[in-house]
Image: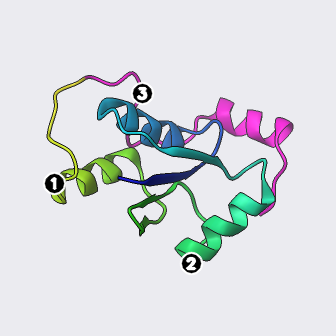
Amino acid sequence: MTIKAYLKPSCGWSNGVRGIMRKYHLAFEDIDIINNRAHYAEMVQKSGQPLSPCVEIDGVMLADVSGEEVENYLLSNDLVKSTETALDVPTNAGCSDEEHAKMATKTIRFF
């Protein structure tokens, strides 16, 4: 399986996607859309919209998804088997105020 995840470096939604990848031991490309203009443009072009996270799995783009939605896609399409492995991050939560503040002061925004 080839997985490209268009993520923010620090974000609740993005961390939820990363958590799902860890839970199922899936190799994936973690693509920083905040600090790299080309990565953000690629995500928008492929997904047809500007919101993240976006996860491309074997050529299928899941746009503006949570970790929970990615997990549901993987399970529904028999790409992974269900597991009760606990995660250390929520899979369906937005960025905290602290994460938003960090992004506003230490990152380059293109949108």
Label 3 Cα crowd, 10 Å radius (few <14 / some 14-19 / many 20+): some
* Point 47% across, 65% down: residue: 63
Q: Give 97 or 59, whichever is nearer the viewer.
A: 59
Question: What residue is shown with label 1?
Answer: 78
Question: What residue is shown with label 2?
Answer: 48
Q: Disc 1 vs disc 3: which is toward the camera?
A: 1
**Is 110 covered by the magenta stretch?**
yes
* Point 22% across, 52% down: residue: 79
Question: What residue is shown with label 3?
Answer: 89
* Point 42% across, 39% down: residue: 27
Cα gap from disc 1 to disc 3, whole angstroms: 24 Å
What percent of the width, then of the height, locates residue 2?
42, 54
* Point 59% across, 39% down: residue: 11
The kind of secondary structure element at disc 1 is: loop
Question: Which of the image's four quarters has the C terminus?
Answer: bottom right
Q: Earlier in the sequence, mark 3 or mark 2?
A: 2
